[in-house]
Image: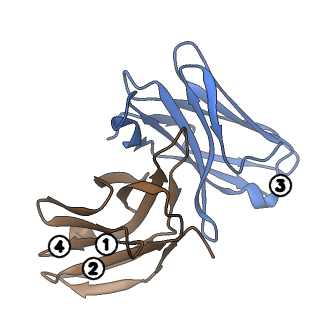
Amino acid sequence: QKEVEQDPGPLSVPEGAIVSLNCTYSNSAFQYFMWYRQYSRKGPELLMYTYSSGNKEDGRFTAQVDKSSKYISLFIRDSQPSDSATYLCAMRANSGNTPLVFGKGTRLSVIA
Amino acid sequence: DSGVTQTPKHLITATGQRVTLRCSPRSGDLSVYWYQQSLDQGLQFLIQYYNGEERAKGNILERFSAQQFPDLHSELNLSSLELGDSALYFCASSPAGTPRYNEQFFGPGTRLTVL
């Protein structure tokens, strides 16, 4: 079992839809959870960053972490064509210099 | 623009050759990370440097090496290249101190093609 699992998609939604992107993980030591957005031929860009369980909101984006289920989500409200990109979840443990572990990414297309 | 720069943008070379990828971190960031991204493996952590010293090592092949210089720029050296080394190579940097240590800012990447 991979440490981080993410459905690769592609996911296609109409403009204005609510998008739900998810990752599951197996390592209970993960404490920090991030979402990155990667446009084609660009480097990943940090969108959201949460510590431990709970919700965090930033504009149209909401990140949720459920450590009991080892499940994290990113919701995008009122999705726009400019949200079309690959979304990568990433996480790391809270000890020493443990590296970020990334999911493989979900490709999202928002159709106008 | 993340503030992290990488050169070159594209590199085409032959099997058995050696190449050097260069990265300049954001101003003030002490940590530099190198990642390899391929379609089948996703984004894989290779190695981290902090203020000139190696901090963490991931799935980095023995044919690959890196260093961070006193001005904090970093180089990733790939030698005896194989077809399977063709990938995007990203550099990222992060500020010092927890929790900002977790905020990694990625460069635009170097696309390596080995023929």
Q: Percent position (x, y) of residue A107?
A: 40, 75
Quarter of the image for residue B8 reads top right
> Mark 3 belongs to which amino acid?
Glu
Q: Which chain is brown?
A: A
The residue beneath circle 3 is B82
Q: Point out the frontmost of discs 1 and 2.
A: 1
Residue A35 horizontal side relative to residue A61, left or right: right
Q: Chain of mark 1?
A: A
Q: Nearer the viewer, residue B78 or B105?
A: B105
Element carrying mark 2:
strand
Q: Which chain is blue?
A: B
Quarter of the image for residue A69 reads bottom left
Q: Label 4 vs label 1: CA separation?
A: 19 Å
Q: Are marks 1 and 3 on the same chain?
A: no
Q: Point out the frontmost of discs 4 and 1.
A: 1
Q: Are marks 2 and 4 on the same chain?
A: yes
Q: Percent position (x, y) of residue A39?
A: 37, 61
Q: Percent position (x, y) of residue A32?
A: 39, 52
Look at the numbered discs 2 and 3 and tell me whether their residues touch, using CB distance below 8 Å: no
> Mark 1 belongs to which amino acid?
Ser
Q: Label 1 vs label 2: CA separation?
A: 7 Å
The residue beneath circle 2 is A20
Residue B74 horizontal side relative to residue B15, left or right: left
The residue beneath circle 1 is A73
Element carrying mark 3:
loop
Element carrying mark 1:
strand
Q: Label 2 vs label 3: CA separation?
A: 39 Å
Q: Label 2 vs label 4: CA separation?
A: 14 Å
